[in-house]
Image: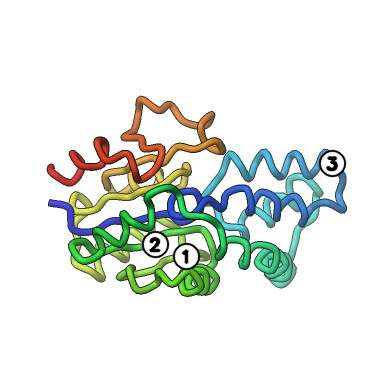
Amino acid sequence: MIKGIIFDFDGVIAESIQMKTDAFATLYSDNGADIVQRVVSHHEANGGMSRFDKIKYYHKTFLNITLTEKEIMELADQFSILVIDKVTEAPYVPGALEYIQNIFIKYKLFISTGTPIKEIIKILEGRNIAHYFTGVYGSPSKKKNHIMDICIKYNLLPEEIIFFGDAKTDIEAAVHHNVQFVLRIHNYNYNYFKLNNYTVIKDFNDTEILKPIFSQ
């Protein structure tokens, strides 16, 4: 019986993927069009990876610069300034808000995102949906650790949890803990997955797909 539901945020609850892509492009715009394209391509292929890890990787791999932790934090703060208001105001994935409102009394709901924890809490509060979630998890902690903490803290078994995600990090975390996974597919991740390997939804209006999941 399902008791807990974990949601990634960007691309699952909010249509905010492009906003993060635009922010990375802006952050690296002074380094030329080729670097921007390489950054954007990696970012789009690695949704769910924290911005701290991405910034460190992009500087080291594309610019041959090893950043200090202080420099990574400064760039991450610049990124946050670029995105937080836009993400807070981003439209919902169709049906997502209504779905959350309909199920939060019956199930324990959680957020697991690569967004920094303080930022995602601020975004949820800004959207007036923080009260729907039993627990909210963000970076620097990894998603595998989010699931482990949820299981321990809230006395849930992996088979009692569903993870709604749209990125490789979501799938890897779910598979690691043997948690059932539902892939939300959209224009930004369509080319990165073999869709017949997953339970797939286009949005939360796909009720014929969602209903059987909870009747198991």
The residue pinned by badge 1 equals 138
Q: Quadrant of the C terminus?
A: top left
Asked if marks 2 and 3 touch (Cβ < 8 Å), the reply is no
176 or 211: nearer the eye? 211
State how far apart marks 2 and 1 are (Cα): 8 Å
Residue 181 placed where, x, y %? 32, 43
Amino acid at the residue labelled 1: Gly
Amino acid at the residue labelled 3: Ala
Q: Kindly indicate the quadrant of the structure image that contains residue 108.
A: bottom left
The mark closer to the camera, 2 or 1, is: 2
Q: Earlier in the sequence, mark 1 or mark 3?
A: 3
Amino acid at the residue labelled 2: Ile
204 or 134: nearer the eye? 204
Name the element at disc 3: helix
**Mark on residue 33?**
3
Residue 12 placed where, x, y %? 44, 50
Residue 132 placed where, x, y %? 32, 69
State how far apart marks 1 and 3 are (Cα): 31 Å
* Crowd band around label 2 with a 10 angstrom C-alpha radius: few (<14), some (14–19), many (20+): many
Vertical arrangement, residue 132 with respect to residue 201, above or below: below
**Mark on residue 118?**
none
The residue pinned by badge 2 equals 111
